[in-house]
Image (cartoon, coloured by chain):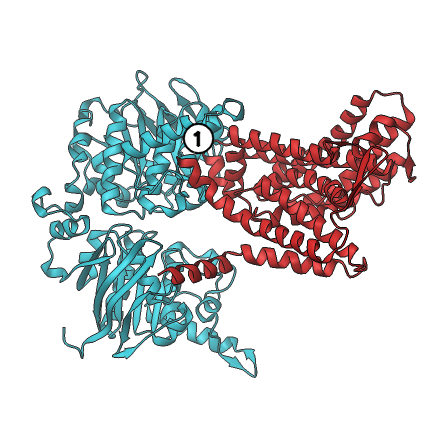
Chain colours: A red, B cyan
């Protein structure tokens, strides 16, 4: 069966991040007392694994959109700011209007979608460099969020909205289910239709795609818009979790975590082949690492360093040069 | 060949890529003051041999002796130190730097730690003069013609006091005059005692300059013979791994292609001379595409052309005459500025390739690498890409359907790939080109424009593509063939339009369609 061969390299790409995650879990089992402790309080589960899942879910949701953007050879730096915008929109809707809950969700997602379309327009139509094009919204987006909230942190008491991120189903927090469902839906859509092929093809050689009649602009516009919607969804989750919209701090540095998750997951920053599963594993890996350091009292100022080292290690193992060396070692061993 | 004459000796050179033996115990001797042609189909091992020799890839086993000394280059730069210089097919120069800077780059003369520009200029001028060129070395390389760039690359190669010069398809982007200039230079360098390894696909050129010919096939050394004692047919047979008995006894200059079984098919489908119209003559019935006085500023001034269904029409002219530019206009990459086009009798102004494709027009571009293949995508996805693009995301072909389409075309076009799932970049140039043709055949176009479909691919694949064109015409497709290989154009096409200085200057058909007449038309009109 041909598909076996197709997924073979994907599995190889996944091997390193999964191995790193396993190593981290083993480390925590041995050296971090209470890392796997879960307790039931007020009908909800609390504990480190639940925390990790909750935070990883947010990164994962953004990383799913980011995966497609990166696969087309782009990048979206504005997702953190879009999270702030979407949270601000949701908070304003629930505090200043009688809008029904589905409408609130729709408005927040639409805000993300519009932001993504702006990015897509700059990249696909005006042919700006993705880094520059999305940097605009990365900087301006928080200003937009401030305008929406009048520069205030808007807190709210809204049962439906706050339960979104604060309830669990089958022990797993809802945001993790959302991330999983989103990844599954996107995975099915990209692999069952030709969308995945188009995205990979455009990332690999957009000029050849144009010559083959592929509407590369529409595809780029589409992935940026979708990435915006994903960021909007993450914004909903975040504001639901803290029951407030904080234009300054919501989704701060989320773009970096999302890009890292994608890269750790094996999708190349130069575009082409992408792996949604890899991005999910990457998101969990990053959160687990962060949490591990907190629990070992690594101060927040120093925390980025071990994180950077871990990321460097995983990325080094994916470098074509290192891969060749390792493959060479194995083939010599077997010869 | 006596040992004293021998400049380079390669002994049982082997290199494997995975399970594939790219080179299998190859021996080669290159004499001082000789031009040694390295021939073989794609995948024969020519490029691998050169890459090993220049240190670009590490060989598995075997040894090089240069001037009797062991030579183990670890990098192309290291190889230059040993006296081995290479000019690659794709010119590796830095466009926005001057000729002098390009020639001396990486080995600048230093004075007090600073680059000595005067010395660099002097050296570059000397190097260029050695080639018999009189060009100002302070010009930016990017502003020079491809031919001059190629010569600059050679000058750069010679600046290191090379003993052995390797040229990998140096003439693929040169026109006739430039090629003969290059040959003069090669002959002069030979007289200076340089050993030259020359890789090319053009048989005429091999016989024009080389002393020795070595044929490789499937990574193995087949034969080495003196060029004067190696008839064309036997050379082609050696390259294709066939016996001379199966090739036609013809001894024409294009003997290489006389062996094409498709030749018969091509001439059968050629319409009789009296049905072919000349420029300006109105032909409404059965016309597929007509181009009338089309221009696009900076690329084409006045192009006329017409194609009928079931007809192959050639576009001939020198490099820069506007052949590719006309193709780009017909395919909607560039817009028509003045003049008009009609397709099947209705106005045709494509705004994009998508537009053109929707009207049933297809193009395999000149630059296979940048405009044709999507390198990391599988062969299968490359083949179904255009068909799927026309259907859109919402009418996706199932994986099984894509497999069927690709498998069918891979089989019928004889594309050699270990599997439809391997990235297309892992295929040889000829097979990549066939996959691109398959991409369009899958969409069933009315008009297929082929821009240099046989450039840089081996003789066998050329023949297969020529056969394929013939069979597409038989099915009623219109074909526009752009090629700098005149024998190919003359054989495949019923009419040929000649372009010169961005204008259509004449049309040849029927009796008057011969290589000589085409060359005359290119040379004399204007």
Residue bearing the label numbered 1: B386
**Is B418 displayed left or right of A277 in the figure?**
left
Using the image as rendered, state which of residue B81 and residue A37 is in the foreground. A37
- Is residue B350 depicted above or below B233 in this figure? above
Q: Is residue B339 among the parts visible in the rendering? A: yes
- The residue located at (26%, 78%) in the rendering is B67
Q: Quadrant of residue B153?
A: bottom left
Residue drawn at (40%, 24%) of the image: B360
In percent of width and height, residue A323 lies at: 49, 57
Q: Quadrant of residue A93?
A: top right
Query: For residue B299, which quarter of the picture?
Result: top left
Q: Residue at x 69, y 57 (%)?
A: A30
Q: Quadrant of the C terminus of chain B?
A: top left
Specify whether residue B452 is in view: no
Spot occupied by residue A146 in the image (x, y as percentages of width and height): 87, 39
Considering every residue shown, the one lying at the far bottom of the view is B112
Is residue B477 left or right of A39 when viewed as pictured? Answer: left
């Amino acid at each position: 069966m041909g598909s076996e061969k197709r997924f073979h390299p994907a599995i190889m790409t996944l091997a390193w991040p999964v191995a790193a995650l396993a190593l981290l879990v083993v480390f925590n089992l041995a050296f971090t007392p209470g890392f796997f402790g879960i307790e039931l309080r007020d009908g909800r589960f609390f504990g480190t694994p639940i925390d990790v899942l909750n935070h990883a879910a947010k990164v994962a949701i953004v990383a799913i959109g980011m995966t497609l953007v990166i696969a087309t050879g782009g990048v979206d730096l504005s997702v953190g700011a879009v999270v702030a915008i979407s949270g601000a929109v949701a908070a304003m809707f629930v505090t200043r209007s009688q809008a029904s809950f589905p409408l609130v969700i729709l408005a927040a997602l639409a805000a993300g979608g519009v932001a993504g379309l702006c990015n897509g327009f700059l990249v696909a139509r005006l042919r700006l460099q993705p880094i520059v094009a999305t940097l605009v919204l990365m900087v301006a987006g928080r200003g937009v969020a401030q305008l929406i909230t009048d520069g205030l942190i808007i807190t709210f008491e809204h049962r439906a909205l706050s339960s979104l991120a604060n309830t669990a189903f089958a022990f797993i927090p809802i945001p993790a289910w959302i991330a999983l469902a989103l990844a599954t839906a996107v995975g099915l859509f990209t692999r069952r239709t030709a969308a995945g092929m188009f995205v990979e093809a455009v990332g690999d050689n957009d000029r050849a795609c144009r010559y083959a009649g592929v509407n590369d602009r529409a595809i780029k516009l589409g992935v940026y818009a979708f990435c915006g919607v994903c960021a909007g969804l993450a914004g909903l989750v975040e504001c639901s979790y803290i029951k407030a919209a904080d234009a300054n701090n919501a989704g701060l540095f989320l773009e970096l975590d999302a890009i890292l998750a994608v890269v750790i997951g094996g999708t190349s920053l130069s575009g082409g082949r992408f792996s949604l599963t890899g991005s999910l594993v990457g998101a969990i890996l990053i959160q687990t690492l962060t949490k591990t350091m907190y629990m070992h009292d690594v101060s927040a100022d120093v925390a980025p360093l071990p994180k950077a080292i871990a990321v460097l290690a995983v990325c080094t193992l994916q470098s074509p040069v290192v891969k060749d060396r390792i493959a060479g070692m194995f083939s010599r061993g077997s010869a | 060949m006596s040992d004293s004459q021998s400049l380079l000796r390669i002994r049982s050179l082997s290199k494997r890529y995975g399970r594939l033996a790219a080179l299998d115990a190859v021996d080669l001797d290159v004499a001082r003051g000789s031009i040694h042609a390295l021939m073989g189909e794609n995948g024969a091992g020519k490029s691998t041999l050169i890459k090993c020799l220049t240190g670009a890839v590490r060989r598995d086993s075997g040894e090089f002796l240069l001037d009797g000394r062991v030579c183990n280059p670890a990098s192309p730069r290291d190889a230059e130190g040993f006296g081995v210089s290479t000019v690659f097919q794709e010119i590796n120069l830095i466009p926005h730097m001057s000729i002098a800077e390009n020639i001396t780059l990486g080995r600048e003369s230093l004075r007090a730690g600073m680059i000595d520009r005067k010395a660099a200029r002097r050296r570059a001028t000397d190097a260029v003069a050695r080639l018999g060129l009189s060009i100002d070395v302070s010009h930016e390389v990017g502003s020079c013609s491809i031919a001059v760039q190629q010569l600059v690359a050679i000058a750069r190669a010679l600046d290191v006091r090379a003993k052995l010069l390797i040229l990998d398809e140096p003439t693929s982007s040169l026109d006739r005059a430039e090629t003969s200039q290059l040959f003069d230079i090669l002959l002069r360098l030979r007289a200076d005692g340089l050993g030259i390894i020359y890789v090319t696909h053009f048989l005429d050129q091999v016989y024009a300059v080389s002393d020795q010919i070595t044929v490789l096939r499937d990574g193995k050394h087949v034969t080495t013979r003196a060029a004067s004692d190696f008839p064309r047919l036997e050379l082609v047979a050696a390259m294709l791994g066939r016996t001379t008995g199966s090739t036609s006894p013809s001894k024409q200059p294009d003997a290489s292609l006389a062996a094409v079984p498709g030749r018969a098919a091509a001439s059968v489908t050629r319409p009789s001379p009296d049905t072919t119209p000349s420029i300006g003559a109105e032909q409404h019935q059965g016309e597929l595409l007509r181009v009338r006085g089309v221009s696009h500023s900076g690329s084409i001034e006045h192009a006329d052309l017409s194609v009928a269904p079931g007809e192959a029409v050639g576009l001939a002219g020198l490099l820069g005459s506007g052949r590719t530019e006309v193709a780009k206009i017909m395919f909607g990459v560039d817009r028509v500025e003045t003049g008009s086009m009609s397709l099947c009798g209705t106005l045709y102004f494509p705004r994009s390739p998508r537009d053109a494709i929707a009207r049933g027009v297809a193009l395999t571009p000149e630059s296979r690498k940048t405009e044709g293949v999507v390198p990391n995508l599988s062969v299968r996805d490359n083949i179904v890409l255009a068909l799927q693009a026309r259907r859109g995301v919402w009418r996706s072909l199932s994986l099984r359907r894509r497999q069927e389409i690709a498998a069918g075309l891979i089989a019928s076009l004889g594309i050699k790939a270990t599997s439809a799932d391997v990235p297309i970049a892992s295929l040889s140039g000829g097979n990549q080109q066939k996959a691109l043709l398959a991409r369009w055949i899958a969409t069933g176009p009315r008009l297929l424009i082929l821009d240099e479909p046989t450039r840089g691919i081996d003789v066998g694949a050329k023949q297969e593509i020529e056969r394929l064109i013939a069979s597409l015409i038989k099915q009623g497709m219109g074909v526009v063939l752009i090629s700098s290989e005149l024998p190919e154009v003359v054989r495949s096409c019923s009419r040929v339009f000649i372009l010169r200085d961005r204008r259509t200057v004449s049309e040849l058909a029927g009796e008057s369609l011969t290589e000589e007449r085409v060359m005359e038309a290119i040379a004399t009109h204007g």
